[in-house]
């Protein structure tokens, strides 16, 4: 057996702020800021929370477009529009942050019972799918790497994607399936199956939308490639300096489009003609960032015709599809539909209150009457979330708070602690909790109903917060707090949208509350 070598990156090509491989990423990212130091929102999620909060304030005061001063990330006072439209740029960065958060908190494959759709470029060639990694005849050191990662059999998407990707000659592929279904592992396996470690030049090139996401993929390459002697990985990300005139000897390069483009063209650190596998990961996040699309296409144009092109995306709207077709010629296409969330197994209630104090009282009554193993509570603004978390703590609850001022890595750590049961209540704002799943939660409380930035019901968020994939048949409980005519109207519209009755609950009546738990 050979000793692991990829964990040791050569000094100049370590990512900026590179870490010792044994330290978990969320403790080591160079962007991490201790909670006490991070009083100002510096990431896009935090900004989004600020905006949501600002929008809520201005909606309730009807002071639309009011100008207000607030300090910027450096403490300087700048003018800001309180209901500033979320810029496209921030929206996009949100996607990258959400994707990173998902990766950091995920420990397992996401189950999916849907059928995989495969569109082969050559419809006459037989359709292969594999049920085991042995069938793929991988190099022994790669198979060993796969097993060491604890993978016993290919995931649903891997069953179909791997035979295509490892075919002779290797095929091009566009693949779409939700986050967590095994796409990264699949393309890492494809890269590693083609890499020749004796050749000291880049042979595989992987584009990621951000530096942090590139690091996550790099970790998978390190783990799966641990039994390759002399395999080296370089990070083409901003801030990673290579001396001019040098060539890169690492066999795999992973990076963001701008830097990769520089390395391939202007700086000539990489000879693109020698690339055998080109991967474009997170295409949906990628195209959301200005410039990435063009840069990716320019990189792709420099690659040889016989280079294998692979593109992956969690979603597949028209814009992603158009981009995919530009980057991947003659593709095979694989799609796996998302498992549908349903409200069928959820009991939904609403409670009528006058203000946040009454809502808190209603919550306390709920806690007094029924046993709540773990609860998630959603608030519209950071201010309410902070207040509520403090009130709950005063009552002796162990509370976790996901707040907009936290960096993604800190959020991941909070979610992890909650998952482990160290805290029993998670209080969060809409923006912070977007896209997260905590399966063991027995009750979801909408302390504020989910609304979009125009104040309309956000049905999708409602479904995602309380919906469960029906097949587990898990029963859940959702309680919505209504505190005005406006929020009653929102509730009614949500009810109509899903065509599911939301029952009124009187939280002053303990007997009535007890009944809902049965
Ligand atoms: N065949 C497998 N068997 C068991 N676990 C797997 C398998 N393939 C991947 N995993 C694990 O499942 C999780 C999700 O896999 P992966 O990161 O490859 O998914 P993904 O679709 O790329 O997600 P994302 O789009 O968020 O990157 C990871 O923890 C990974 O180690």
Image (cartoon, grey):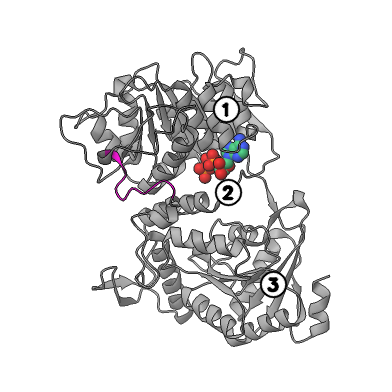
Residue under numbered circle 2: 107
Above or below residue 272? Residue 422 is below
Instruction: In the rendered structure, find residue 117 and report the number of the disc placed on it.
Output: none
Q: How crowded is mark 2: few (under 14 residues within 10 Å), some or many (20 or more)?
A: few
Estimate the x, y position of residue 167 in percent, counting from the top left. Answer: 54, 17
Earlier along the polypeptide chain: callout 3 or callout 1? 1
Q: In which quarter of the image is the C terminus?
A: bottom right
- Tell me the quarter of the picture where residue 243 sits: top left
Q: Which of 122 and 81 is in front in this view?
A: 122
Residue at point 38% right, 67% down?
A: 34
Query: Which residue, given by chain and number where applicable, does mark 1 sit on?
Result: 161
The local secondary structure at tag 2 comes to loop
Q: Does the residue labelled 3 lie within 8 Å of ligand 1?
A: no
As drawn, 289 above or below 394:
above
In the image shown, does 384 or 462 lie closer to the viewer? 384
N-terminal-most mark, 3 or 2? 2
- Of the residues tagged 3 and 2, which is closer to the observer? 2
Residue 295, magenta (yes or no):
no
In the image, 492: left or right of 298? right
**Relative image position of residue 384 (x, y in whole percent):** 51, 78
Q: As drawn, is 263 to the left or to the right of 53? A: left
- Asked if the residue at tag 2 contacts the one at tag 3, i.e. Cβ–Cβ closer than 8 Å, the answer is no
Q: How far apart are marks 3 and 2 (CA)?
A: 29 Å
Disc 1 secondary structure class: helix
Residue identified by numbered label 3: 479
Extent of the magenta region: 13-22
Split into quadrants, the picture shows ligand 1 in the one at: top right
Asked if residue 16 lies in the magenta stretch, the reply is: yes
């Amino acid at each position: 057996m050979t000793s692991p070598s990829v964990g040791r990156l050569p000094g100049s090509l370590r990512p900026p702020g590179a870490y010792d491989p044994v330290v978990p990423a969320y403790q080591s990212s160079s962007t991490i800021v201790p909670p006490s130091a991070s009083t100002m929102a510096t990431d896009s999620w935090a900004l989004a929370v600020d905006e949501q909060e600002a929008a809520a304030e201005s909606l309730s005061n009807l002071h639309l477009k009011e100008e207000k001063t607030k300090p910027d990330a450096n403490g300087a006072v700048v003018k800001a529009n309180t209901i500033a439209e979320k810029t496209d740029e921030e929206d996009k960065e949100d996607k990258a942050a959400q994707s990173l958060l998902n990766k950091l908190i995920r420990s397992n494959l996401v189950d999916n019972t849907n059928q995989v759709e495969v569109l082969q470029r050559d419809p006459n060639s037989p359709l292969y799918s594999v049920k085991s990694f042995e069938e793929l005849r991988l190099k022994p050191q790669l198979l060993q790497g796969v097993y060491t990662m604890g993978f016993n059999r290919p995931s649903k998407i891997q069953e179909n994607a791997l035979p295509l990707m490892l075919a002779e000659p290797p095929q091009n592929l566009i693949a779409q399936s939700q986050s967590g279904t095994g796409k990264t592992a699949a393309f890492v396996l494809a890269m590693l199956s083609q890499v020749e470690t004796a050749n000291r030049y880049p042979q595989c090139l992987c584009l990621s939308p951000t530096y942090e996401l590139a690091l996550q993929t790099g970790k998978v390459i390190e783990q799966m490639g641990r039994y390759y002697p002399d395999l080296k990985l370089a990070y083409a990300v901003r801030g990673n300096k290579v001396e001019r005139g040098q060539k890169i000897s690492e066999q795999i390069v992973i990076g963001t489009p701008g830097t990769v483009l520089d390395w391939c063209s202007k700086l000539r650190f990489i000879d693109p003609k020698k690339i055998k596998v080109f991967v474009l990961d997170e295409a949906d996040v990628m195209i959301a960032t200005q410039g990435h699309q063009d840069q990716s296409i320019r990189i792709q144009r420099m690659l040889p015709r016989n280079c294998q092109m692979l593109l992956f995306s969690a979603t597949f709207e028209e814009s992603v599809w158009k981009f995919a077709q530009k980057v991947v010629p003659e593709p095979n296409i694989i799609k796996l539909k998302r498992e549908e969330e349903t409200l069928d197994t959820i009991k939904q209630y609403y409670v009528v209150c006058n203000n946040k104090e009454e809502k808190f009282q209603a919550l306390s009554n709920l806690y007094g009457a029924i046993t709540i193993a773990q609860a998630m509570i959603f608030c519209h603004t950071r201010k309410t979330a902070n207040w509520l978390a403090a009130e709950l703590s005063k009552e002796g609850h162990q509370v976790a708070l996901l707040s907009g001022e936290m960096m993604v890595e800190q959020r991941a750590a909070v979610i992890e602690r909650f998952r482990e049961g160290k805290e029993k209540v998670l209080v969060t704002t809409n923006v912070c909790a977007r896209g997260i799943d905590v399966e063991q939660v027995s009750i979801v409380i909408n302390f504020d109903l989910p609304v979009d930035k125009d104040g309309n019901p956000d049905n999708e968020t409602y479904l995602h917060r309380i919906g469960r994939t029906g097949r587990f048949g898990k029963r859940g409980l959702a309680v919505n707090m209504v505190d005005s005519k406006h929020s009653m109207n929102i509730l009614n519209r949500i009810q109509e949208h899903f065509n599911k009755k939301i029952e009124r609950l009187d939280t002053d009546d303990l007997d009535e509350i007890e009944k809902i738990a049965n």
